[in-house]
Image (cartoon, rainbow, N blue to C red):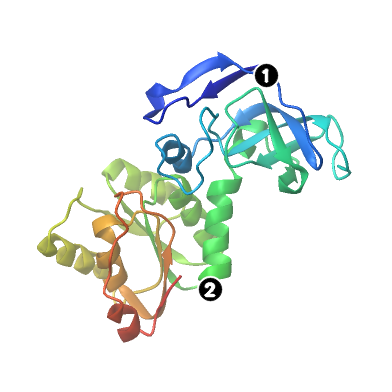
């Protein structure tokens, strides 16, 4: 079979397309014939050795796929050959066939095609868990989404709207702001490109607060990090919840004054 391989750590253009042996399922595993594979930020990180999972070289990236069950390993009873499924696999998805633990399969829902299904679990699953389980977002609350036109960001905008929140988008260009508004944001702003000095951070925090008025946001969803984390945290309201989702803006984990959470009776989750 064919597969896209990472044989040496580097950018996406260092990947190669080669023949590799077809996988054989072990106990509790299945082989999926891949119809579509999602492309997410972790896929870019993993091929540069910057992600928490570090598969041995060579490997195929691609953390989520949609396809059809081709073969079953010993003890697999929850699916049968020919079933359409979504597979959450961590890596290996940029190949014609891939192994997946049977417990990490989701039956393909009716009405969704393979392409959309392959890009669904990581982005929408992350945002649904963050907003529902961690932030416990309530109807009528205000939600600020950083990186609101990206994968998880746009999913957070849509899910926040469905949950009844007033969603505000923070993005890096006017075009992205229009995308976020088209998906449910009621307002937003374009933040400057980093790095940001202290004066720029202070102004950005004031701009965030001006979006919602009052004491600040009930929930802040941050997949960006970097120099944007502290200005966002300073814009949180009383008993607000600040969601740490990712660090797309920088390789460095941001350091924020923890007294900000104390002063607002807030949570960093």
Which image quarter is the N terminus in? top right
Q: Give the quarter of the image for residue 96.
A: top right
Q: Residue lying at the far front in this picture: please name it.
A: 56
Cβ atoms at labels 1 and 2 below 8 Å apart = no
Q: As displayed, is residue 136 above or below residue 222?
A: below
Residue 138's disc number: 2
Q: Give the quarter of the image for residue 13.
A: top left
Mark 1–mark 2 Cα distance, whole angstroms, equals 50 Å
Query: Which residue is at a point 55% across and 15% down the rendered structure image?
Result: 18
- Answer left or right for 176 relative to 199: right
Residue 211 in sight here: no
Residue 98's disc number: none
Residue 184 in sight here: yes
State the residue in front, 76 or 40.
76
Q: Give the quarter of the image for residue 64.
A: top right
Q: Which numbered disc flags the more N-terminal residue, 1 or 2?
A: 1
Give the x, y percent position of residue 198. Answer: 12, 64
Q: Categorize mark 1 by other alpha carbons within 10 Å: few (<14), some (14-19), many (20+).
A: few
Q: As displayed, is residue 167 above or below residue 44?
A: below
Give the x, y percent position of residue 242. Answer: 40, 70
- Answer left or right for 185 relative to 31: left
Q: As displayed, is residue 52 above or below residue 71?
A: below
- Answer left or right for 58 relative to 249: right
Q: Categorize mark 2 by other alpha carbons within 10 Å: few (<14), some (14-19), many (20+).
A: some
Residue 21's disc number: 1
SS at circle 1? loop
Query: Which residue is at a point 37% across and 29% down the rendered structure image?
Result: 11
Tally of numbered discs: 2
Query: Which residue is at a point 80% across and 43% down the rendered structure image?
Result: 28
Give the x, y percent position of residue 20. Answer: 62, 18
């Amino acid at each position: 079979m064919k597969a896209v391989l990472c044989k040496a750590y580097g950018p996406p253009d260092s990947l190669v397309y080669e023949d590799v042996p077809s996988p054989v399922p072990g106990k509790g595993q299945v082989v999926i014939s891949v119809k579509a594979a999602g492309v997410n930020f972790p896929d870019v990180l993993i091929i540069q050795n910057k992600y928490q999972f570090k598969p041995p070289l060579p490997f195929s990236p691609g953390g989520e796929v949609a396809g059809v069950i081709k073969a079953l390993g010993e003890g697999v009873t929850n699916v049968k050959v020919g079933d359409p499924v979504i597979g959450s696999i961590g890596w290996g998805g940029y190949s014609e066939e891939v192994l997946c633990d049977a417990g990490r399969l989701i039956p393909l829902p009716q009405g969704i095609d393979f392409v959309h299904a392959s890009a669904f679990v990581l982005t929408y699953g992350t945002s649904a868990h963050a907003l529902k389980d961690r932030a416990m977002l309530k109807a009528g609350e205000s939600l600020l989404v950083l990186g609101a036109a990206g994968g998880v960001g746009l999913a957070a905008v849509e899910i926040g709207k469905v949950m009844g929140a007033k969603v505000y988008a923070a993005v890096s260009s006017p075009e992205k702001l229009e995308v976020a508004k088209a998906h449910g944001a009621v307002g937003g702003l374009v933040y400057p490109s980093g790095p940001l000095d202290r004066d720029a951070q202070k102004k950005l925090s004031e701009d965030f607060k001006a979006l919602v008025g009052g004491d600040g946001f009930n929930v802040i969803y941050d997949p960006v990090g970097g120099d944007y984390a502290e200005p966002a945290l300073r814009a949180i309201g009383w008993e607000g919840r600040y969601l740490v989702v990712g660090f797309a803006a920088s390789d460095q984990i941001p350091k924020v004054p923890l007294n900000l959470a104390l002063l607002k009776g807030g949570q960093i989750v």
